[in-house]
């Protein structure tokens, strides 16, 4: 039995740190380069595991050096690897990240993440049935995400859908998720260019808008609730949304109500940006309790 099952992407993040983000046609000299573990799926799984949850994962890596390092990292963080396939002849997903002033710009090359198919889900169907909560993002094929949403709604397994990066999805399918956690760009992409407050009102206690350092908002059926973020000095905001989602899943799996769950997730996300790398600053439970 897993507390949380993440179905999603695993990437090696190639991080270029620079004072000046290059403009089109411009070359700049940067400050440093590191390769660190990433991928929205892997980040969310690590965030949940650090907070003490029993975490399973369904995903794919290639049979390359990046894949081996990413698997070692997940295992070291306590994520169960049995649902991860190693695909021969494929490259592991990579993300090129330009980090400047604590903020990032990212290009993802999905590699093996594109092979997380419905057939792979079928091979691991028992993992879904034996999970308290499933967490999905959009760095694997959308048809697989929609397939999992359908399976989970039939099996009554609650799902958090983090619709990132923004992509087109069937409206019926999106709404099969128990909770949907877009940012300010993604909510417009999914629900149309309307007043965000009106969109939140249509999906009470289901649609949770993440607003970076400002915190998060949702509608409770009666009124709009805004949960304030925590002011911190951001070193690297990469993975803050993933930390929010991983922590939110932990909080829901523990039976917290939506306000308490969002407060918990906001706090975890704030701490995560204080160190370099998507997973570098993700807090452990004691870090949350002591902050
Ligand atoms: O959300 C941050 C993540 O997006 C990075 O770790 C990168 O791999 C991309 O998937």
Image (cartoon, helix red, strand yellow):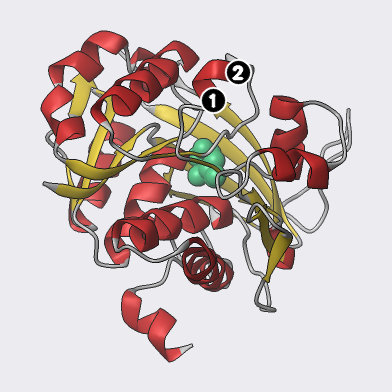
Q: Do the residues labelled 2 and 1 touch (CB within 8 Å)?
A: yes
Q: Nearer the viewer, residue 66 or 177?
A: 177
The local crowd at label 1, few if under 14, some if 14 to 19, many if 20 or more residues have their Cα within 10 Å, is some
The residue identified by callout 2 is 171
Q: Is mark 1 on a helix, strand or loop?
A: helix
Above or below: residue 267 compared with residue 139: below
The local crowd at label 2, few if under 14, some if 14 to 19, many if 20 or more residues have their Cα within 10 Å, is few
Q: Nearer the viewer, residue 139 or 186?
A: 186
Horizontal arrangement in the rendering, residue 236 relative to residue 279 (left or right)? right
Q: Who's the residue at 49% across and 88% down the image?
A: 291
Residue 36 position in % (x across, y down): 43, 50
The residue identified by callout 1 is 174
Residue 37 position in % (x across, y down): 40, 47
Q: What element carries label 2?
A: helix
Q: Who's the residue at 61% across and 32% down the image?
A: 165
The answer to which image quadrant residue 87 occupies is top left
Q: Is residue 14 visible?
A: no
Q: Work out how far the residue at label 2 is from the one at label 1, CA to CA, in angstroms.
A: 5 Å
Q: Which of 108 and 220 is in front in this view?
A: 220
């Amino acid at each position: 039995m897993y507390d949380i099952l993440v179905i999603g992407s695993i990437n090696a993040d190639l991080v270029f740190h620079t004072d000046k983000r290059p403009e089109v046609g411009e070359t700049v000299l940067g400050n440093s380069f590191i390769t660190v573990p990433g991928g929205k799926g892997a980040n969310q799984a690590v965030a949940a595991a650090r907070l003490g949850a029993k975490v399973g994962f369904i995903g794919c890596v290639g049979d390359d050096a990046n894949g081996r390092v990413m698997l070692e990292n997940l295992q070291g963080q306590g994520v169960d690897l049995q649902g991860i396939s190693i695909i021969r002849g494929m490259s592991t997903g990579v993300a090129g990240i330009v980090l400047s002033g604590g903020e990032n710009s990212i290009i993802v090359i999905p590699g093996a993440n594109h092979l997380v198919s419905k057939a792979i889900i079928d091979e691991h169907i028992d993992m879904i049935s034996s999970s308290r909560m499933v967490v999905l993002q959009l760095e694997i094929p959308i048809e697989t995400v929609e397939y999992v949403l359908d399976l989970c709604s039939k099996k009554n397994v609650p799902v958090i859908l983090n619709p990132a990066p923004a992509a087109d999805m069937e409206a019926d399918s999106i709404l099969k998720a128990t909770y949907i956690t877009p940012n300010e760009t993604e909510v417009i992409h999914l629900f149309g260019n309307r007043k965000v407050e009106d969109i939140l009102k249509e999906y009470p206690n289901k649609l949770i808008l993440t607003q970076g350092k400002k915190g998060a908002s949702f509608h409770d059926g009666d009124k709009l609730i805004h949960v304030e973020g925590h002011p911190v000095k951001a070193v690297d905001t990469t993975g803050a949304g993933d930390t929010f989602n991983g922590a939110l899943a932990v909080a829901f799996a523990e039976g917290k109500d939506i306000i308490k769950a969002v407060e918990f997730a906001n706090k975890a996300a704030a701490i995560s940006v204080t160190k370099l790398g998507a997973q570098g600053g993700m807090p452990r439970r004691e870090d949350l309790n002591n902050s």
